[in-house]
Image: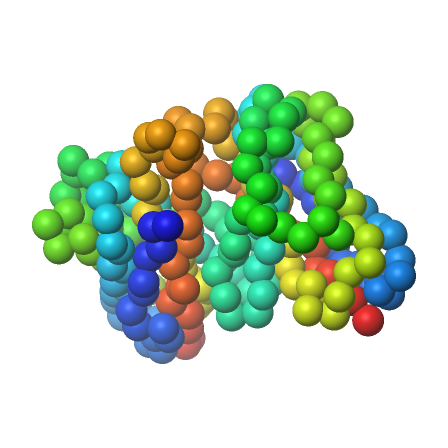
């Protein structure tokens, strides 16, 4: 199974809502990533988990809270978001963080709209 | 950080023609990867070329790397309508010190192949 799944596909939320994005992979990968992608822009790295521990936080605002409950799951908890946070949120995984020749496997993304 | 710059930003061709996209980067790399993204979807890894390689083929894809010029190109031969997508280069910096060898995506080239 070389698939990364993400739920939901679409999410509309108000600025006072709390919601969560979910990502799952069963490839035995130990590195997992959250990216944010605005329209017509490249993906921008937000967070990296390695062996279920947060390794990289690219200065992301605290209204985004990642969580890695186990080696297959990655969540992104959202609270008090702003309209400018509307974007495509992509999850990715790779074998191990730091290996140079690893490719990243991406999920299809969650299209988030903040009203 | 190491971000690729791609050229052209957009490319429109007829089915059967070849498509060439170029990527330039700034500092030394361990490898360079190319990804494809269909509209509003996740990224798919296409090919990886190591810093000590000059050319690599995969099906209809040909990638070149010139480390002296810090540039790479992706050639898609005999293009098909299904090749319509955004293509991103991702230079993979050398890991060292506090760096884990971050993958940073270029701005991308939007390829449209007309039937």
| Observer-nearest of A99 and B46 | A99
How many callouts does the rendering have?
0
Q: Residue at x 41, y 64 (%)?
A: B107
Residue B8 to residue B57: above or below:
below
Residue A27 to residue B17: above or below:
above
Q: Residue at x 75, y 66 (%)?
A: A82
| Observer-nearest of A72 and B39 | A72
Q: Position of residue B33 (x, y in %)?
A: 34, 45
Which residue reaches farthest left? B68
| Observer-nearest of A38 and B77 | A38
Residue B35 to residue B30: above or below:
below
Q: Position of residue A51 (x, y in %)?
A: 59, 22
Q: Residue at x 58, y 49 (%)?
A: A59
Q: Position of residue B20 (x, y in %)?
A: 25, 65
Q: Does residue A104 appear anywhere in the picture?
A: yes
Q: Position of residue B27 (x, y in %)?
A: 24, 48
Is residue A15 toward the left or the right of residue A110 in the image? Answer: right
Q: Quadrant of the C terminus of chain B?
A: bottom left
Instruction: Specify the color scheme.
Output: rainbow
Residue B59 to residue B106: above or below:
above
Q: Residue at x 39, y 27 (%)?
A: A99
Q: Does residue A90 appear anywhere in the picture?
A: no
Is residue A60 toward the left or the right of residue A63 in the image? Answer: left
């Amino acid at each position: 199974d070389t698939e990364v799944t993400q739920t939901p596909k679409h999410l509309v939320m108000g600025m006072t809502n709390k919601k969560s994005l979910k990502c799952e992979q069963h490839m035995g990968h130990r590195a997992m990533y959250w990216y944010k992608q605005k329209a017509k822009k490249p993906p921008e790295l937000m967070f990296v988990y390695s062996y279920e521990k947060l390794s990289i936080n690219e200065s992301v605002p605290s209204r985004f809270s990642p969580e890695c409950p186990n080696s297959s799951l990655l969540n992104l908890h959202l609270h008090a978001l702003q309209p400018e946070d509307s974007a495509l949120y992509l999850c990715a995984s790779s074998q191990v963080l730091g290996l140079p020749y690893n490719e990243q496997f991406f999920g299809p993304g969650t299209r988030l709209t903040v009203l | 950080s190491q971000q690729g710059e791609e050229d052209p930003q957009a490319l429109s061709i007829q089915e059967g023609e070849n498509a060439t996209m170029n990527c330039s980067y700034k500092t030394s790399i361990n490898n360079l990867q190319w990804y494809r993204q269909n509209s509003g979807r996740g990224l798919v890894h296409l090919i990886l070329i190591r810093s000590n390689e000059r050319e690599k083929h995969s099906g209809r894809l040909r990638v070149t790397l010139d480390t002296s010029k810090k540039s790479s190109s992706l050639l898609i031969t005999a293009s098909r309508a299904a090749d319509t997508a955004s293509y991103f280069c991702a230079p993979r910096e050398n890991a060292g010190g506090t760096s884990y060898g971050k993958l940073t995506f270029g701005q991308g080239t939007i390829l449209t192949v007309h039937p």
